[in-house]
Image: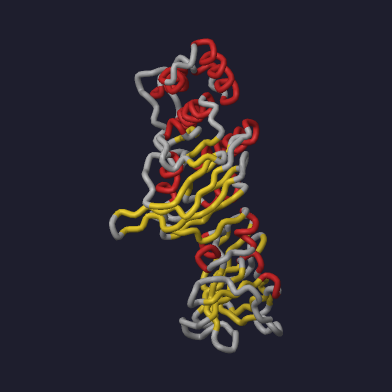
């Protein structure tokens, strides 16, 4: 197993800074996700680790070895691309073993690795087929098989599930995570899908505009977002963030120095006149089956509450909203960062 250490990594194209001083460490045998919106630099970062791009500055170490100037073949990595990159004229077996043949691995060893990968991925009966005869999920497994037979200690994956439908993405998430654990691979996985990040990762590196917004375990990222951006990016629906006035109340107009954050599931809907509750008016209701989302307006702020089951409430109704002090997060609107010790 190999760890991956990125230190002060940068990639500039003239005045454009795709990455600007990124540093983090992925422990050996762990699953790290590079998460963020389109254009945040996550795919560029993965390509730099792979050796497909040249950094403007900084360093990359794999298993303690500085690989910043090494070509991809010398880095001890395997990579799975978004497009799968399968050769249409080759069979499944030939696609999986292509890299081994290029590296002149002997036939007996290629056969042994192929059989093991095919068994792990459920491809044994498909080895003679061409990619055009496979489903999207099967093609994804072939791409994974090529990474497995390489026996590289580090595997990089660039949005590998984006071409699959929702049900198949769910199944493949489980398969990839299980494979990573069984093979004890160090995996770095790029996605813009927070569900993939939260369900698969040991570590989430959240990127924004070429910088790291937060680097934490999924539960820590969700429970203690370091910034307003992190709070709003993680969660479905995301954390409510509303401006506060100088007295610490929800502002009647936007632009206060402070902001309050609270997760929808932490908000309790109570009668309008309940002492201590925030008085609000319902704007919309979304029934989702297991629960209901209630959006209500208070001053300049809009708060969404997630309540179990089907709520017996209508748009326009006056309601009260309440939550515990432990459930609230205070942010500095000027910096966007969380206030470490918020006032009561």
Image height check: is 259 above or below 138?
Answer: below
Which color scheme is applied? secondary structure
On screen, residue 302 versus residue 273, left or right, reads: left
On screen, residue 53 versus residue 206, left or right, reads: left
- Identify the residue at the far top of this view: 108
Snapshot quadrant of residue 186: top right
Snapshot quadrant of residue 239: bottom right
Image height check: is 170 above or below 288?
Answer: above
Image height check: is 230 above or below 180?
Answer: below
Query: Residue at 41% across / 43% down in the picture?
Result: 47
Residue 187 in the image, given as x and y percentages of width and height: 55, 40
Image height check: is 279 above or below 179?
Answer: below
Residue 111 in the image, given as x and y percentages of width and height: 53, 13
As rendered, which of 154 and 158 lies closer to the eye? 154
Q: If the image is split into quadrants, where does the C terminus sit?
A: bottom right
Is any part of residue 208 visible from this angle? yes
């Amino acid at each position: 197993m190999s760890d991956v250490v990125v230190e002060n990594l940068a990639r500039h194209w003239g005045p454009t800074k795709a990455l600007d001083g990124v540093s983090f460490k992925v422990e050996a045998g762990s699953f790290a996700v590079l998460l963020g919106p389109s254009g945040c630099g996550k795919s560029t970062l993965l390509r730099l680790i792979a050796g497909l791009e040249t950094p403007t500055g900084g360093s990359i170490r794999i298993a303690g070895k500085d690989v910043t100037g090494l070509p991809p073949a010398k880095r001890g990595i395997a990579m799975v691309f978004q497009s799968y990159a399968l050769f249409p004229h080759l069979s499944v077996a030939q696609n999986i073993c292509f890299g081994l043949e290029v590296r002149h691995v002997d036939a007996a060893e290629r056969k042994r690795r192929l059989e093991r990968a095919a068994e792990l991925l459920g491809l044994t009966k498909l080895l003679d087929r061409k990619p055009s005869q496979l489903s999207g999920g099967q093609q994804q497994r072939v791409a994974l098989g090529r990474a497995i037979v390489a026996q590289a200690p580090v595997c990089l994956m660039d949005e590998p599930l984006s071409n699959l439908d929702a049900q198949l993405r769910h199944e493949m998430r489980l398969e990839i995570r299980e494979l990573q654990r069984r093979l004890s691979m160090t995996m770095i996985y790029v996605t813009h899908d927070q569900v993939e990040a939260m369900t698969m990762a040991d570590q989430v590196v959240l990127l924004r505009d070429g910088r790291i917004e937060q680097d934490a375990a999924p539960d820590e990222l969700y429970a203690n977002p370091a910034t307003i951006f992190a709070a709003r990016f993680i969660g479905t629906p995301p954390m409510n963030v509303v401006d506060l006035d100088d007295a610490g109340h929800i502002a009647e107009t936007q632009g206060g120095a402070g902001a309050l954050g609270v997760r929808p599931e932490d908000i309790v809907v109570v009668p309008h006149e309940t002492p201590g509750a925030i008085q609000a008016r319902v704007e919309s209701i979304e029934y989702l089956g297991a629960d209901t989302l209630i959006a209500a307006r208070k001053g300049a702020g809009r708060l969404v509450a997630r309540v179990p089951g089907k709520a017996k409430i209508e748009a326009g109704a006056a309601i009260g909203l309440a939550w515990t002090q432990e459930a609230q997060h205070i942010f500095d609107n000027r910096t966007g960062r969380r206030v470490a010790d918020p006032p009561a």
